[in-house]
Amino acid sequence: MRCLALSDELKSSFEVIFVVRENESKTELEKYNFDIIQIKANSNEEDSMLLLATNNPNSIWIIDTKRKFLEKFLPSLKKNSDVVLLIENLSKNIDHADGILFPAAHLDYNILDPWLPKSKRDMVLTGWDWILLRNEIINASRSDSYFPLVITTGGTDPSGVFFKIWELLEGAQIHATFMIGDSFANRNKLPLPDEFLKIVDYDIKYIASAGTIISTFGISVAECLFLNKPVISVAHSKENARGSEILSTRTPACINLGYFEDLTQERLIKEIDELKHPNEEINSWLSQNVIDGQGAKRVVSWIKRKVEEC
């Protein structure tokens, strides 16, 4: 989805082609009418990309994967390309890329130490200004608190955060709307809704019309903040919990509750009750529109500057 957000901005100035592994993401991308090149499932991904770069010199490569590349890959790719932009990738020789985008406000700079010298940190693009939002979010109609509490636990939710939060809210007499995506992993195990707890298919209108949101930590937290909604962040893994903790120190509107398995009913209900009437600090931060929805435009402007320098 991050590359889709960028592609919407890029397509007015560049020809956009998605390179994906065979049977991976193709169906989703076809809905957006972008050209697609598929790498065969049994082929070497790096060799295939280098061949494409050789056959299409002076291209711009935006690579959104966390897989570790071999030492020779990035220098070889850059040799045949105008611009190489990595998204959240930490591999050997990342300083051969033109930039590394961390489209979030919770980067822990310590993770860069094994991969990127401090003298080259100016190639890192990160912070509130660089958050990438889908047009669906940017164009959403914000409204008053029609849904007092909305819970979103991500697309597949393989860790089962949905069920943990449901268990903690069951019997608490709190009105809550749980959203599930098309790819939700355990639809056959969903509990029965009752007077207080409801289940709906994902729709941005619920977030845009929520009073308070509980979200698994990730881009959905930034989406909530963009829509001026205070958000309770619950991490689906202990690693994820570190990012949630960092972000909560950078905005009062994100309440970090840590790793979901450690969450207690008492603490969850306490935070829900407090956010029914957000304090002045939270309201002030939200009113500043710190996330302005212009992240994709900034990235495209950065790419154009790099192309001009070639």
Image: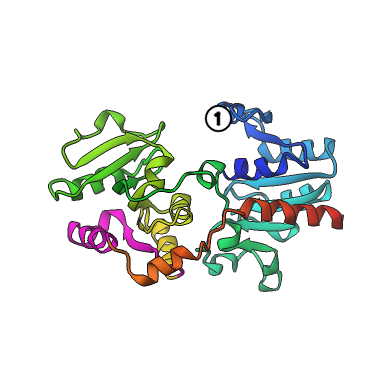
Where does the magenta region start and end?
A: 250-276
Indicate the quadrant where residue 294 lies.
bottom right
Q: Position of residue 289 (x, y in %)?
A: 51, 61
Is residue 180 visible in this depiction of the protein?
Answer: yes
Report the residue at 19% width, 33% height from top. Answer: 192
Whether residue 123 is situated above or below residue 182 in the rendered picture: below
Q: Is residue 35 left or right of residue 240?
A: right
Q: Position of residue 159 (x, y in %)?
A: 34, 44
Residue 254 lies in magenta, yes or no?
A: yes
Towards the viewer: 180 or 97: 180
Whether residue 167 is situated above or below residue 255 in the rendered picture: above
- In the picture, which quadrant includes the C terminus? bottom right
Which residue is disc 1 drawn over? 28
Q: Position of residue 195 (x, y in %)?
A: 16, 39
Report the residue at 38% width, 67% height from top. Answer: 282
Report the residue at 74% width, 57% height from top. Answer: 98
